[in-house]
């Protein structure tokens, strides 16, 4: 029997039992759509994570800390540390820049200051970096931009910085009222760098434990008005790595700190045994840009050899990807149950077809049709059911995916931190794999019915009613 004759007979047999064929295809369609949609949820999480990291250059950047330090070092502690500890200085930045595959190195000076506007006050986490590093971070601005060299010290605000402000009188802030404070970041803000003096000046004799005694007044620190360079794009529900931070040029920040503190110890900076500050300003970390993520391991080894601790975001990304793969397997397994049920339906359909076509099978054998042709005919019918169900399932999964992305964008954004988040992502390879899987399931379900058809006795088949 020729191949096309075999296909024509298989399709003709399926068409004669339209309702049963349709219901079987419906089962495969639902099973295929279940698997595709379930797996697409995990793929969307993975894709959103990768896009977020790539948009900020996170896959090709390495944070460098003092030896043994892998967390933010912006504390106000001024305790004496070991003189053998290698600190991050301007010389360190030069050393890091000489490492092969390193394209950019920037110091990172981190400290906390106070910002005041009207009745609101906020704790601001300030990061001083080079302008080249700020440009490399690919920041998206709602207004303004990266400060120019002639602008002097000016700040770039993250889109969620307003969450750090609260009413100084009532103590209520965003987390209490769930409403952003009435602070306009584009209008003048008073900045207080010397927090210790500020809070000391606010304390009364009773609060300082000197009740009944005459407390020595603390002189309030000077307030500074500095311009706003820009505000990052995004609302209060959009989170990125820079959402809570305030960024500025590191050299302008150092100049301002030297002006404010003069001979006093700066917040977060070490002091000598006598409590005096060092002449040099030490950085909290270094920002290192490499040419490709494949060179990250070798660059990290060079950094360790210099006596510092590297931290690569892609290591966290790899951990997240493993978790997402587990999620995809679990969700895919749940969807596979539906396709397994559909496979049982295919097997049932083919078995019923054999019982109804027993005489037809016997006639084919008497006329000289080979056993392989009979087997191929039933496998072709089962494959056709799987193919039609797979195509319909892909169409249904596409509709479901579009609906989730269209009407569930707000929910997806809160989960992934992306402004235009995809809840469901169906790549071409997933669609192709699902289609092939549906056909293979159909063939597997029709295999044993095909064997039964091959084993039928021709004479017994012809005599059957």
Image: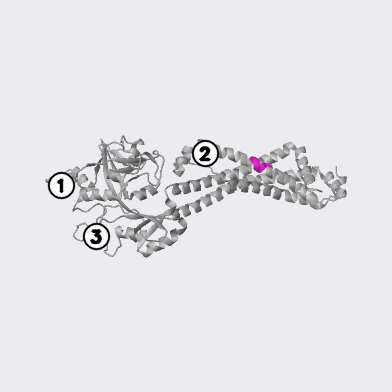
Looking at the rendering, the stretch of residues picked out in magenta corresponds to 388-392
Q: Is residue 67 above or below residue 257?
A: below
- Kindly state the secondary structure of the residue where label 3 is placed: loop
Main secondary structure found in the magenta portion: helix
The answer, for residue 395, to whether it is visible in the render is yes
Q: How far apart are marks 1 and 3 (CA)?
A: 29 Å
Residue 10 at x, y percent in the picture: 77, 43
How many residues crowd around disc 2 within 10 Å: few (fewer than 14), some, or many (20 or more)?
Answer: some
Tag in front: 3 or 2: 2
Q: Which of marks 3 and 2 is nearer the N terminus?
A: 3
Determine which residue is flagged by label 3.
80
Q: Residue 360 is drawn in which quadrant?
A: top right
- Kindly state the secondary structure of the residue where label 1 is placed: loop
Q: Are marks 2 and 1 in contact (CB under 8 Å)?
A: no
For image coordinates 44% across by 40% down, the residue present is 419
Determine which residue is flagged by label 2.
405
Determine which residue is flagged by label 1.
210
Verify whether residue 391 appears in magenta. yes
Residue 34 at x, y percent in the picture: 60, 43
Tag in front: 2 or 1: 2
């Amino acid at each position: 029997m020729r191949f096309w004759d075999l296909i024509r007979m298989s399709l003709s047999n399926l068409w004669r039992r339209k309702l049963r064929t349709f219901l079987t295809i419906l089962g495969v369609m639902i099973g295929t759509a279940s698997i595709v949609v379930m797996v697409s949820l995990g793929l969307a999480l993975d894709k959103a994570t990768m896009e977020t990291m790539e948009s900020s250059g996170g896959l090709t950047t390495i944070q460098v800390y003092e030896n043994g330090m892998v967390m933010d070092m912006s504390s106000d502690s001024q305790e004496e540390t070991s003189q053998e500890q290698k600190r991050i200085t301007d010389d360190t930045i030069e050393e890091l820049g000489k490492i092969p595959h390193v394209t950019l190195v920037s110091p990172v000076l981190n400290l906390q200051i106070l910002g005041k506007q009207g009745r609101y006050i906020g704790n601001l986490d300030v990061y001083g970096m080079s302008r080249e590093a700020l440009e490399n971070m690919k920041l998206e601005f709602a207004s303004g931009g990266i400060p120019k060299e002639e602008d002097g010290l000016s700040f770039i605000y993250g889109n969620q910085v307003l969450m750090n402000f609260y009413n100084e009188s009532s103590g209520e802030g965003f987390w209490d009222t769930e409403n952003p404070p009435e602070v306009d970041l584009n209008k003048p803000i008073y900045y207080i760098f010397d927090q210790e003096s500020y809070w000391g000046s606010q304390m009364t004799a009773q609060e300082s434990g000197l009740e009944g005694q005459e407390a020595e007044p603390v002189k309030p620190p000077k307030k500074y008005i500095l311009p706003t360079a820009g505000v990052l794009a995004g609302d209060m529900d959009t989170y990125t790595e820079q959402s809570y931070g305030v960024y500025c040029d590191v050299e302008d920040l150092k100049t301002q700190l030297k002006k404010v503190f003069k001979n006093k110890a700066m917040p977060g900076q070490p002091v000598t045994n006598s409590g005096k500050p060092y002449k040099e300003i030490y950085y909290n970390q270094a920002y290192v840009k490499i040419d490709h993520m494949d060179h990250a391991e070798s660059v990290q080894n060079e950094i360790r050899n210099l006596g510092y601790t590297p931290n690569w975001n892609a290591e966290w990304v790899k951990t997240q990807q493993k978790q997402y793969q587990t999620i995809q397997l679990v969700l895919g397994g749940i969807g596979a149950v539906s396709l397994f049920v559909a496979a049982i339906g295919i097997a049932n359909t083919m078995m019923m077809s054999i019982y109804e076509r027993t005489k037809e099978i016997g006639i084919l054998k008497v006329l000289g049709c080979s056993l392989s042709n009979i087997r191929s005919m039933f496998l072709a019918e089962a494959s056709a059911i799987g193919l039609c169900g797979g195509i319909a399932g892909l169409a249904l999964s596409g509709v479901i995916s579009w609906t989730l992305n269209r009407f569930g964008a707000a929910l997806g954004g809160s989960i992934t931190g992306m402004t235009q988040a995809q809840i469901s992502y169906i790549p071409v390879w997933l669609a192709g794999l699902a289609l092939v899987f549906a056909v293979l399931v159909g063939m597997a379900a029709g295999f044993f019915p095909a064997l039964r058809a091959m084993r039928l006795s021709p004479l017994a088949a012809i005599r059957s009613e």
